[in-house]
Image (cartoon, rainbow, N blue to C red):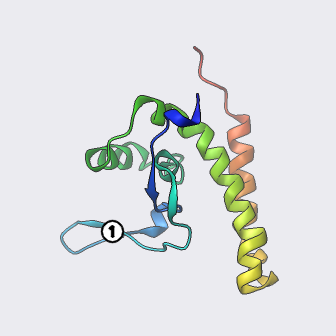
Amino acid sequence: MPGQDLTWGVRHGDVTLDNILVGQGGDLGLHDFDRSGAGLLAADLTGVRSTAQWPAFLAGYLEHRPLTRVDLQAIPVLQVAELIANLRFHLVHKVALFGAETRGEGWVERELASLRDIAQQRPPRA
């Protein structure tokens, strides 16, 4: 799956259910843009992929920002890459900004547990 086939653009960088706000009228909004910037759009879907809300989130996302078949196929691989990037953020950048005590927040353990869960999943049959 060549990288040039994936859709590139401005992305949030940390789309999780914790970073979604629901307005009074039911409108959704995002906050926490410390990791936003240019990147692969499908990577924004990885933070919600392992939740029960995944089908509804994906459907809503695709209504507003269409992705290609290649983008959608890349999501499992991008999920692993995003978990590794999150580990780097929490072990290097966040520590540099806020101090070593941030390592005790539990993020590292959760990201490592997610990587273990993915490693134990059976790959889909072709």
- Left or right of 22? Residue 112 is right
Residue 26 placement, left or right of 109: left
x, y (%) of residue 65? Answer: 32, 48
Figure check: 49 above or below 14: above
Quadrant position of the C terminus in the picture = top right
Q: Quadrant of residue 118?
A: top right
Expressed as whole percent of the image width and height from the top left, the position of residue 46 reads 53, 49
Residue underneath mark 1: 29
Tell me the crowding category of disc 1: few under 14, some 14 to 19, or many 20 or more residues within 10 angstroms, Cα based: few
Q: Is residue 18 above or below residue 8?
A: below
Q: Give the residue at the far top of this rendering.
A: 126
Classify residue 60 as left or right of residue 100.
left
73 vs 1, nearest the viewer: 1
What quarter of the picture does the N terminus occupy?
A: top right
Q: Residue at x 72, y 47 (%)?
A: 115
Q: Quadrant of residue 123?
A: top right
- State the residue at coordinates (22%, 66%): 26
Q: Residue at x 46, y 49 (%)?
A: 41
Q: Which element type, helix, strand or loop, lies under badge 1?
A: strand
Q: Amino acid at mark 1?
A: Gly
Pick whichever, 14 or 103, lies toward us. Answer: 14
